[in-house]
């Protein structure tokens, strides 16, 4: 145990010595006390993050996905609000932000939930567990709650070839800006195909030890890579490793 702790400490020192740079304050609209962000990264830092977050999931239902999962079409979104605090407009603005800053990601609103590819349910904390049970059944919901003690959740349904058919997220809206914003931005990344978490990555919103509450430059870059046409649904890690370096190299605003 002591040897493990020492190794972890040494790894952290090495990472900091060669880590991201150009630290900037959080963007306008972030909650009070939100962390600053780095805006320039090495190719290795982006490669590592992409491979960790775009493959796998800590909650799998059904067959384990074998490769990249993402939408292969324009995305229709819908916000269903049953919360005591009305955050529907704020959630719709977040949808719009993701579409505006991510090349090749086309997002627009659906007229109703049935026509939507991506649905966000805004609910009160007191109704969260019941909503999960109604959506996924008692066994799945209780396992998820016991394992993660969540304040939000996303289910991504995809075909065998990796194309996402539909994503459904549950976000708590009545526990203040910090909880809402952190969940909303976090779950959108899952819903769009960055399905995993990485608790050792100091830059991503998908590190559950961090509370961020905005779309970071790092995560935006990973999403841009995911929706590049040269990254296709179903691609394996080996296939992605071959093409990713050339895609990262043409991200001049973020790669140092």
Image (spheres, rainbow, N blue to C red):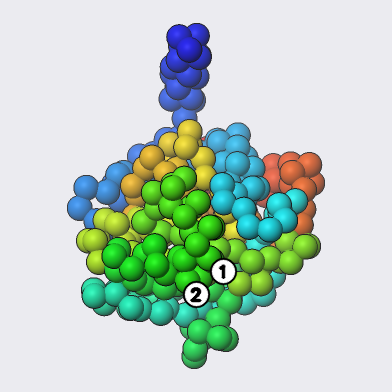
Q: Residue 162: x percent and y percent?
A: 73, 61
Q: Of label 2 and label 1, which has the lower sequence position? A: 2
Nearest the camera: 27 or 213?
213
Horizontal side of 235 relative to 34 (left or right) equals right
Please give the label number shown on residue 65. none
- Dots 2 and 1: beta carbons under 8 Å? yes
The residue at the far top in this view is 3
Q: Which residue is mark 2?
A: 119
Q: Position of residue 196 (x, y in %)?
A: 56, 48
Relative to 215, residue 82 above or below: below
Q: Residue at position x 49%, y 90% from top? A: 111
Q: Quadrant of residue 63?
A: bottom right
The vertical placement of 48 against 83, above or below, is above
Residue at point 57%, 51% (across, down): 59
Residue at point 76% right, 57% down? 234
Report helix, strand or loop for mark 2. strand
Residue at 47% of width from left, 66% of height from top?
133
Q: Position of residue 14 (x, y in %)?
A: 48, 19
Element carrying mark 1: strand
- Mark 1 highlights which residue? 167
Whole-number angstrom distance, CA of label 2 to CA of label 1: 6 Å
Q: Is residue 231 visible?
A: no
> Measured from the top left, where is residue 158 in percent x and y?
68, 65
């Amino acid at each position: 145990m002591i040897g493990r702790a020492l190794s972890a400490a040494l790894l952290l020192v090495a990472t900091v010595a060669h880590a991201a740079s150009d630290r900037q304050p959080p963007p306008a609209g972030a909650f009070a006390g939100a962390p600053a962000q780095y805006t320039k990264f090495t190719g290795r830092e982006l490669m590592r993050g992409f491979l960790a977050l775009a493959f796998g999931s800590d909650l799998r239902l059904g067959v384990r996905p074998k490769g990249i999962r993402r939408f292969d079409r324009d995305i229709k979104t819908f916000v269903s609000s049953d919360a005591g605090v009305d955050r529907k407009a704020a959630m719709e603005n977040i949808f719009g932000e993701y579409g505006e800053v991510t090349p090749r990601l086309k997002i627009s609103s659906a007229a109703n939930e049935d026509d939507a590819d991506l649905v966000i349910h805004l609910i009160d904390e007191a109704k969260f567990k019941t909503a999960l049970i109604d959506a996924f059944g008692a066994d799945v919901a209780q396992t998820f709650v016991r394992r993660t003690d969540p304040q939000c959740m996303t289910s991504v349904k995809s075909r065998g070839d990796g194309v996402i058919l539909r994503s459904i997220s549950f976000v708590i809206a009545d526990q203040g800006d910090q909880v809402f914003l952190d969940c909303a931005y976090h779950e959108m990344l899952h819903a769009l195909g960055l399905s995993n978490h990485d608790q050792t990555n100091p830059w991503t919103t998908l590190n559950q030890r961090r509370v961020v509450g905005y779309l970071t430059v790092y995560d935006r870059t990973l999403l841009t890579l995911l929706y590049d046409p040269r990254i296709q649904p179903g691609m394996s890690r080996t296939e992605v490793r071959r093409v990713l370096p050339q895609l990262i190299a043409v991200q001049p605003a973020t790669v140092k």
